[in-house]
Image: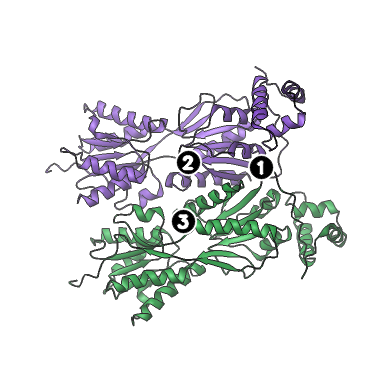
Chain colours: A purple, B green
């Protein structure tokens, strides 16, 4: 369907909503001075008309809006650093906003984005309501998600990594070392990245004729505290695992601490594999065997894609998954048969 | 001296530089299309005239420009998260830029800032040349430094923490536990924060009648690798220290790894005190005793100060130091006399 652009639509919406064109313009640009009720009526009409603002003229100081879950987490900060670098090379200023604990934007964020008129928006491990997505779309602001949270919208391009492969590689490595009782700490069930890693773990066990016992599968929200608590729970089982696939590096640090307080040595008594390959994996003692996630490449792709969508809004695109690789360091070893 | 503002100055500068007012305006707003030579001539004249642009009208989408050394370091990411939070509460968008390894901005950064016309600029552990500072000043863009690098300019307001006190507290804690041979890994000599911590360490030793031996004082650049290398060097001395004041949490993790590979147990064989109290201090095994730096309060002060300087450019201000406190966790213990 061709896009309805043009000033004519603006006049039509104003007439139907019984307001002035300047009121419609205020709503379009996220400015104040319009009641919630009027704003909602105008948004609905814009949507009916499939209104899309024409790309503005090239801005003198272009901006890229980034919404990130847990800005100061090891994962968040490394992705942000990579996006900043990619944006800087194109002389685009990165505006950074933190998200709520539900991985959604704070109130006013979309309004503020509309006022800033960025070249595009990148979401990191966040989700956005259909209404908010429509508000961006109707202003012709492209949206790209990196590791989306929630049920991903099919019409929003996203960048991820090969999580299923990563989960498979991590588990296969432990199996190859002779481990047969392998625990896993999974991420939030509403994140595709976590379910894909769990599914890779299960497939690797299956391929080796092992059964994944439910007591060995533990949930978490990618926090250190989850790694510590679930690691302790796993290691306190009557028949504890000899290896744990901690599906984030931060979990792995929690498992390290659980092992330390229980007097277990890594890797002699327990093998641990992390996920992400952040700096904290190299700083751990012993250095952590982990699945390398290509954050720099993901960030480059995200910025590149936003810019392309800016030029060609109708470009067909769904999802890119970038390959993961296993990095073997000091936290994994052959199963100690004497135990 | 009263500020020369006004359009009259603009005309005068244009006349003296033998260019049009629009060329002067291009230089003021960081736009392209002016030769380097002409730009330099106009900047010099603006400085002679002590030109200060009048504060622009309230922007529809106000921005705060932040330049940060090592965006993805544990320290950088936690300060940035706090600044983002403070800025968000005032509905100001934070534009984040990374710095070079020399803690200076990349080429074009100042030009881009001038184009964005932010409400102010915050530098984190960075430095800015006198020319660049003048370019910001002449556009009336206030500048605030957090933990400045290099020799701090006396005319730039800065926010720091009580580094001397922190260094004293850390060392005193180790002395009180009976340690007499206490090593230190210091930060870059050109950062006031590091020299103040070293000075606090020396004062604490003095106050206990101990002499700080040169071989126990080791330099670094606040990286994990420095902590590992210098920790290993200290612990390999003929008469090794029984305690190390690692003047950053990241150093402390390096010292942990040095101790682990040498077969030393923390805190039984070696006590370690960090600095900053970042999340990595809580995630360490054992959890790290460290000096708490009030990053949230520092970030709030920085944003608050930028906004005040925006309203009152002539406000007299030099430096705020916010108090530090020692947080005792599991990495320090009484000196093991049997050794």
Between residues A109 and B261, which one lies in front from this camera angle?
A: A109
Q: In this picture, is A296 found above or below B224? A: above
Residue extending furthest left? Answer: A338
| Subunit bearing disc 1 | A
In the rendered image, residue A296, in percent from the top left (x then y), is placed at 49, 42
Identify the residue at image location x=29%, y=56%.
B286
The residue that disc 1 covers is: A62
Q: Compute the Cα span from label 2 to label 1.
A: 23 Å
Mark 2, secondary structure of its residue: loop
Q: Compute the Cα span from label 1 to label 3.
A: 28 Å
Discs 2 and 1 share one subunit: yes
Left or right: residue B302 compared with residue B206: right
Question: Decide: marks 1, 3 in contact (CB < 8 A)?
Answer: no
- Which one is in front in this view, the residue at disc 2 or the one at disc 3? 2
The residue that disc 2 covers is: A69
Give the image quarter of residue B4.
bottom right
The answer to whether residue A162 of the structure is visible from this angle is no
- The C terminus of chain B, quarter of image: bottom left
Left or right: residue A297 compared with residue B207: right
In the rendered image, residue B178, in percent from the top left (x then y), is placed at 27, 74
Discs 1 and 3 share one subunit: no
Mark 1, secondary structure of its residue: loop
Mark 3, secondary structure of its residue: helix
| Subunit bearing disc 2 | A
The residue that disc 3 covers is: B75
Circle nearer the N terminus (2, 1):
1
Q: Compute the Cα span from label 2 to label 3.
A: 18 Å
The answer to whether residue B49 of the structure is visible from this angle is yes
Left or right: residue A220 compared with residue A21: left
In the rendered image, residue A271, in percent from the top left (x then y), is placed at 24, 43
Left or right: residue B57 compared with residue A186: right
């Amino acid at each position: 369907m061709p896009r309805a652009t043009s000033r004519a639509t603006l006049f039509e919406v104003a007439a139907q909503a019984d307001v002035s064109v300047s009121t419609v313009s205020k709503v379009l640009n996220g400015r104040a001075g319009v009641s919630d009720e009027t704003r909602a009526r105008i948004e609905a009409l814009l949507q009916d008309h499939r209104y899309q603002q024409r790309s503005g003229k090239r801005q003198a100081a272009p901006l890229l809006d980034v919404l990130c879950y847990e800005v100061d987490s090891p994962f968040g900060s490394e992705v942000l650093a990579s996006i900043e670098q990619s944006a800087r090379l194109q002389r685009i200023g990165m505006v950074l906003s933190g998200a709520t604990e539900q991985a959604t934007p704070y109130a006013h964020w979309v309004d503020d984005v509309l006022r800033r008129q960025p070249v595009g928006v990148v979401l990191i491990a966040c989700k956005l309501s259909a209404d908010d997505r429509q508000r961006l779309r109707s202003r012709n602001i492209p949206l790209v998600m990196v590791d989306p949270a929630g049920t991903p919208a099919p019409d929003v391009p996203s960048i991820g990594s090969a999580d299923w492969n990563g989960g498979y590689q991590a588990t296969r490595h432990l199996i190859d070392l002779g481990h047969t009782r392998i625990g896993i700490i999974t991420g939030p069930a509403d994140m595709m990245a976590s379910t894909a890693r769990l599914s890779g773990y299960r497939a690797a066990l299956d391929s080796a004729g092992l059964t994944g016992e439910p007591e060995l599968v533990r949930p978490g929200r990618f926090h250190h505290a989850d790694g510590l608590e679930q690691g302790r729970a796993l290691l306190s089982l009557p028949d504890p695992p000899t290896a744990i696939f901690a599906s984030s590096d931060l979990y792995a640090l929690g498992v390290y601490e659980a092992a330390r307080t229980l007097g277990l040595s890594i890797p002699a008594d327990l093998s641990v594999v992390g996920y992400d390959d952040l700096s904290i994996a190299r700083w751990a003692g012993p250095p952590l065997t982990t699945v390398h996630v290509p954050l720099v490449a993901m960030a480059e792709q995200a910025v590149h894609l936003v810019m392309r969508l800016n030029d060609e809004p109708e470009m067909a695109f769904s999802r890119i998954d970038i390959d993961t690789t296993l990095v073997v360091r000091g936290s994994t070893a052959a199963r100690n048969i004497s135990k």
